Amino acid sequence: MAAGQRPPADLSKFISVDDFQDYARAHMDKARYEYVASGTEDEQTLQENRAAFKRFFLVPRFMRDVSKIDTAVDVLGHRASLPVLVSPAGVHNICHPQGEVGCARACARAGTIMAVSQHANSTLEEVAAAAGGAPQWFQLYILKDRALTRDIVRRAVAAGYKALVLTIDSARFGYREADARNGFVGLPEGLSLPNYPTREGYDDRDREAWDQNTERIFDTTCDWSEIAWLRSITTLPIVIKGVMAPEDATLAVQAGASCIIVSNHGGRALDGCLASIDALGPVVAAVREQCFRSDMVPVPVMMDGGVRRGTDVLKALALGATAVLLGRPVFFALATAGEDGVFKMLQLLRRELETAMVLTGCRSLAEIGPELVVHRAPYAFQRSSL
Ligand SMILES: Cc1cc2nc3c(=O)[nH]c(=O)nc-3n(C[C@H](O)[C@H](O)[C@H](O)COP(=O)(O)O)c2cc1C
């Protein structure tokens, strides 16, 4: 049965974020499900993104007045009702006909910020309109065709997006073997990438897996000087997504980034890459150091990859993140019930985060500090000194 033609799921039966994945696995077409769920090669990073959270343990504090809990956060001058944003991720319509438009409505209802992918199945203007004025960010890949890249930025500004998210980790997409095995070579019939006005110069079906078709339009010559180019064509804050090394975090701040997202593309780029939650602490330290040296207010650092529980959110915030973002849970919630599924999934996480805050004695996000977490193997990820 095609997505969206199923009888509506009974959302009262969905108790945790993983329930949406179980539902999607059971009800979606296998190739579509695996396109979303899979990671590259051995899926080591995909699995590690989640496993790494479980190596951090919480050290709770008690006997504090926790009768009122505030989960609100300010990000780049806009308020979100919870520190859980939506990662930019293309082709939401693979899971539900409402696609990005449904997701935008759910985020507006939940009071959180959606980062809209350049590879959305609706135009960036349609997704902006669906948010009804709620703040959104737009995610960009720099294309070989600079005139087209510039035009996409111009449209994002005109549509009212509040920040540009530049994804830097995908000069080449990692190879997801599931797509090749499933013959998932092109977008399913009826879906397109309408932010590209034409498909001139690339055929989205002539390789053995879908991402390998789109990556050929990306500019792989980019280096940090591109941030200056972007800043020359827009005054929007620039968020750099895909930073894993502290050295790159320093360079991103020097280049003028307004925010950094620690991310390994949800295990869809380099397999064998460190888990995002393990990369977070060193990146936060590097950003603080660079901002201190430059006499700047520290730029916010966020992370995505494997966040599925309120306690995951709390751990990330304790390790220095301002907020986290969600990728796959949004797809699975869309597959379950479109806009309502995404809204319900966000509400579940909100409740879990509130519970985690009560049980650790934190009334506001500002009270979530590094003393709340211990790591099972604190030196396991030390770099070689050779
Ligand atoms: C189906 C799919 C499509 C994605 N498309 C994009 C994209 O267009 N741009 C981007 O920056 N990241 C993209 N991502 C990566 C997400 O933004 C995010 O980094 C990742 O999904 C976070 O990990 P999680 O899925 O474990 O939450 C995509 C992820 C998935 C699962």
Image (cartoon, rainbow, N blue to C red):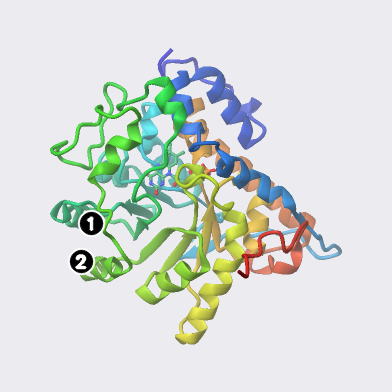
**Place of residue 78 in the rendered image (x, y in percent of width and height, measured from the top left):** 44, 63
**Place of residue 91 in the rendered image (x, y in percent of width and height, measured from the top left):** 36, 35
Q: Quadrant of the C terminus?
A: bottom right
**Along the line of sight, the residue nearer the viewer: 213 or 26:** 213
Classify the position of ligand 1 by quadrant: top left, top right, bottom left or bottom right: top left
Residue identifier under label 2: 233
Question: What residue do we see at 24% from left, 58% from top?
Answer: 157
**Along the line of sight, the residue nearer the viewer: 41 or 50:** 41
Residue identifier under label 1: 153
Question: What residue do we see at 34% from left, 52% from top?
Answer: 139
Q: How many marks?
A: 2
Decide if residue 244 is on the left or right side of residue 63: left
Q: Earlier in the sequence, mark 2 or mark 1?
A: 1
Question: What residue do we see at 63% from left, 27% from top?
Answer: 12
Report if residue 21 is visible in the image.
Answer: yes
Question: Looking at the picture, which amino acid does disc 2 mark?
Answer: Ile
Q: Residues within 10 Å of mark 1 (few under 14, many from 20)?
A: many
Q: Residues within 10 Å of mark 2 (few under 14, many from 20)?
A: few
Residue 285, compared with residue 86, is above or below; it is below
Q: Quadrant of the N terminus?
A: top left
Report if residue 77 is visible in the image.
Answer: no
**Place of residue 333 in the rendered image (x, y in percent of width and height, measured from the top left):** 51, 32
Question: Looking at the picture, which amino acid does disc 1 mark?
Answer: Val
